[in-house]
Image (cartoon, helix red, strand yellow):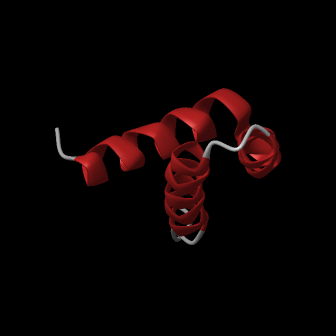
């Protein structure tokens, strides 16, 4: 799996686990990592956030 595929998989997992609160969870992770000085972790979660935003832009599926 490529790093890009990993970030997509992580974004989907966060979406499934946290639903409407996914963006809040990602923001909390980024904040905690930034306070801990983990620049690589912050970068990874920013990539996840970007993909989560893209998932939020999906058109609704017909029911």
Would residue 22 appear left or right of 15 to someone viewing this image? right
Q: Residue at x 56, y 43 (%)?
A: 41
Considering every residue shown, the one lying at the far top of the view is 17
Total labels: the figure holds 0
- Is 36 in front, or is 22? 36
Q: Residue at x 60, y 66 (%)?
A: 53
The front one of 35 and 58 is 35
* Image position of 40 (left or right of 15): left
Q: Quadrant of the image for the N terminus? A: top left
Find residue 35 and report its horizontal and vertical position in percent.
82, 43
Image spot of residue 52 (x, y percent): 57, 57
Answer above or below: position of 14 versus 27: above
At a point 72% along the width and 48% down the height, the residue shown is 30
- Which residue ends up furthest to the front in the rendered image? 37
Q: Please name whichever residue, 24 or 36, is drawn nearer the observer in this view of the structure.
A: 36
Query: Residue at 60% of width from left, 57% of height from top?
Result: 49
Nearer to the camera, 46 or 63:
46
Residue 16 in the image: x percent, y percent? Answer: 59, 33
Residue 18 appears in view: yes
Specify the quadrant of the image occupied by residue 9.
top left
- The answer to whether residue 63 shows anywhere in this view is no
Above-or-below relation of 40 to 29: below
Above/below status of 54 relative to 36: below
Query: Residue 12 placed where, x, y %?
Result: 49, 41
């Amino acid at each position: 799996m490529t790093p890009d595929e990993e970030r997509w998989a992580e974004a989907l997992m966060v979406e499934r686990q946290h639903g409407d609160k996914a963006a809040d969870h990602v923001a909390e992770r980024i904040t905690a990592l930034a306070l801990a000085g983990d620049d690589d972790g912050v970068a990874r979660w920013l990539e996840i956030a970007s993909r989560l935003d893209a998932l939020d832009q999906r058109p609704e599926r017909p029911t």
